[in-house]
Amino acid sequence: MAISIKILQTGSIRIRPSHRHQPADKAVLLRRLSVLLDTSWTDMLPINTYLIDHPEGPILFDSGESPHSMEPGYFPLWMPFFHLAVDIDVGKDEGIGSRLEQENLTPGDLKAVVLSHLHHDHGDGLPDLVGAPVWITEEHWQAYKTPFHATMEGAVPNQWPASFKPSILQPTGGPIGPWNQSYPITEDGKVVAVDTPGHVPGHLSVIVRADDVSYLLLGDATYDQDLLDQELTDVWSRAH
């Protein structure tokens, strides 16, 4: 069985251009204030998740945005970021639960759900994935397990499943490329996670080594290739 990847889009989002990158020497709070004061928008961007077809079982990278995010009261009223800095469009049949059904899968069929991080457009599909093992890094969970802080940092913990507590990836894999350690997802080592901090503490990306090519699924490590090449800092990053 060949390893393959399929994109499952869970709606679209547009953000303020100042959200994409700002100078690394600019204070984080000033960067975020700039976003709230920005009055322009980017084009609509896809909110993608990735279904990895692997002999050990299907693996989902990120859970995307929820159709319920379109409902009044979904986002906390006291957090201005959700109301001023993002514009989301998710159809009723575009949530990850519906996307998996379209692939004839249930959450229980998944070997693993690996989250790059818990920001709303990566973690809000979690209620549709109850029954699947969800994995993140220890550093990220320590940074986001407190609901108030998680909300301030762009997550929506009040929408997570009740008593949500993810499994913690262990860095037991060997070095790969420029990384000194990795987090094995599959026993054959074909799918591993690696640390890509910067956007948020404990952010990770996933490497998939298929038969003829290797893929690096970045999450929000960067918004596009040019920003990556220039090593430009985004609005959230505290690590320079």
Image (cartoon, rainbow, N blue to C red):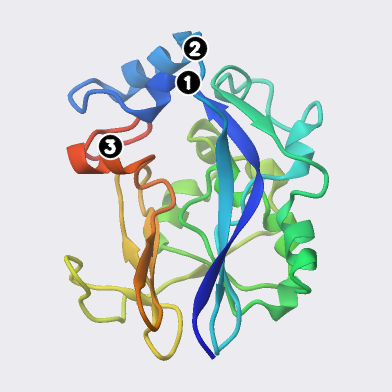
Q: Secondary structure at mark 2?
A: loop
Examine the image and state in which quarter residue 227 appears.
top left
Q: Amino acid at mark 2?
A: Ser
Query: Could you tell me if the residues under marks 1 and 2 are in contact, i.e. CB atoms within 8 Å?
Result: yes
Position of residue 55 measured from the top left corner of the image (x, y, whole percent) = 55, 89
Badge 2 or badge 3: first in the primary sequence: 2
Q: Label 2: how many residues lie within 10 Å, few (<14), some (14-19) or many (20+)?
A: few
Q: State how far apart marks 1 and 2 are (Cα).
A: 6 Å
In this rendering, the label closer to the viewer, 3 or 1 = 3
Determine which residue is flagged by label 2: 40
Position of residue 6 measured from the top left corner of the image (x, y, whole percent) = 57, 65
Badge 3 or badge 1: first in the primary sequence: 1
Q: State how far apart marks 2 and 3 are (Cα).
A: 19 Å
Determine which residue is flagged by label 3: 227
Position of residue 114 measured from the top left corner of the image (x, y, whole percent) = 52, 66
> Is residue 158 or residue 240 the one in the foreground?
240
Q: Amino acid at mark 1?
A: Arg
Q: Amino acid at mark 3?
A: Leu
Query: Could you tell me if the residues under marks 2 and 3 are in contact, i.e. CB atoms within 8 Å?
Result: no
Q: How many marks?
A: 3
User: At x 36% / y 80%, what residue is drawn?
Assistant: 212
Determine which residue is flagged by label 1: 16
User: At x 68% / y 53%, what residue is drawn?
Assistant: 125
Relative to 237, is 115 on the left or the right?
right
Does 77 sit above or below residue 56? above
